[in-house]
Image: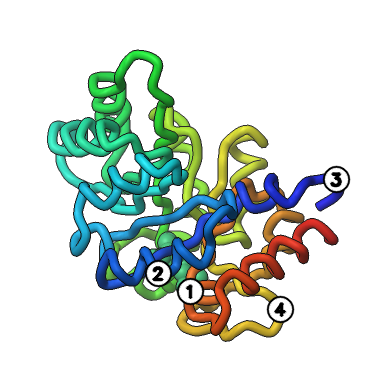
Amino acid sequence: MSAISKADAAGRIMVAMDYANAESAEGLLKQLEGIPCYVKVGMQLFYAAGPGFVASLKDRGYKVFLDVKMHDIPNTVKGGAESVTRLGVDVFNVHAAGGKQMMEAALEGVDKALKPGAGRPMVIGVTQLTSTSLQVLNDEIGLTGSVEQAVIHYARLAQAAGLQGVVASPLEVTQIKAACGDGFVTVTPGIRPAGADVGDQSRIMTPAEAFAQGTDFVVIGRPITGAADPRAAIESIIDGVIKS
Ligand code: C5P
C-alpha cells in the first residue's frame, strides 16, 4: 500500500483478542503498547471479562471493536445497541440475517444512547459466516444459491438498513464494493501473513493482498496472539503492508 504511515497501517488492523479472561488480554495489550491498532473483543472475552473491561479499554484510549454479533427481535437489539453505545465502543456488529428492521433498530439504539459530542460507533453487518459451506447454506440453513450470492444479498440489505459496512471474507471484497460502493466499509477476517499457520481458516489472504482487494480493515488473531513475540509479529505485518 503506497505512501501510508506505520500508524495508518496499524489503524487498519483489528487484533482479535480471543482470550478466556481479562488477564490474558492485558498481557497482550502490554506487549502491543503504543501501537495504534484496534482491539477486537469477541464473545469469549466479553462474556468472561464483561462490560467493565470494555469500559476500561476505552478509558485507556483503545479503539474497540465489540464483536458480539447481535441477532434478536428488533426491540432487544435496540436495547443491546444502546448498552454498547454507552460503553463507548467504536465498532459493533449485528447479523444481517436478523432483517432490515432489526438492523434499523440497532441504529435507533445508537441514536438513543449517544451522548452529545461522543463519537458515533460504526455499526456493521455480519453477512454469511465464513465457516458456512455451500452444503450448510443450502441444506441446513435452507437458502438457495451460492455463498457469494448470500453475502452480496446481506451486504445490500445491511446498506439499505443504513449500516456502514459488513464483515466478510477478503475474497468477497471486490463484489461487495461493486454492489454497495467503495465507501461501504469491509472488515475482513481470514487473514494470514505469508508463512503463518492457517489454523481453521480456509479461504485466506495475506494482509497486503486483502488491502489490495480494497478492504478497509483486516481482523488478525492467532498470527499475532499466538506468536512467540506478538509485538514483532504485528510490526512485521505493518511493514509488509507499507512495503506492498
Ligand atoms: O485467529 P484468527 O486470525 O483466525 O481470528 C479471526 C477472528 O475473526 C476471530 O476472532 C473470529 O471470531 C473472527 N471472525 C472470523 N470469521 C468471520 C467472522 C469473524 O474469523 N466470518
Q: Secondary structure at mark 1?
A: helix
Dot 3 or dot 4, earlier in sequence: 3
Label 4 sits on residue? 194
**Numbered label attached to residue 225:** 1
Label 3 sits on residue? 3
Q: Secondary structure at mark 3?
A: loop
Dot 1 or dot 4, earlier in sequence: 4
Dot 1 or dot 2, earlier in sequence: 2
Q: Is residue 36 above or below residue 196?
A: above
Q: Are marks 3 and 4 in contact (CB under 8 Å)?
A: no
**Numbered label attached to residue 27:** 2
The answer as to whether callout 4 falls within 8 Å of ligand 1 is no
Residue 8 placement: quadrant? top right
Q: CA distance from mark 1 to mark 2?
A: 10 Å
The answer as to whether callout 1 falls within 8 Å of ligand 1 is yes
Q: CA distance from mark 3 to mark 4?
A: 22 Å
Q: Are marks 3 and 2 in contact (CB under 8 Å)?
A: no
**Numbered label attached to residue 129:** none
Residue 148 visible in the current orientation: no
Q: Are marks 3 and 1 in contact (CB under 8 Å)?
A: no
Dot in front, 3 or 2: 2
Whole-percent x, y for residue 153 in the image: 46, 45
- Side (left or right) of 208 relative to 64: right
- Along the line of sight, which residue is nearer the eye, 153 or 106? 106
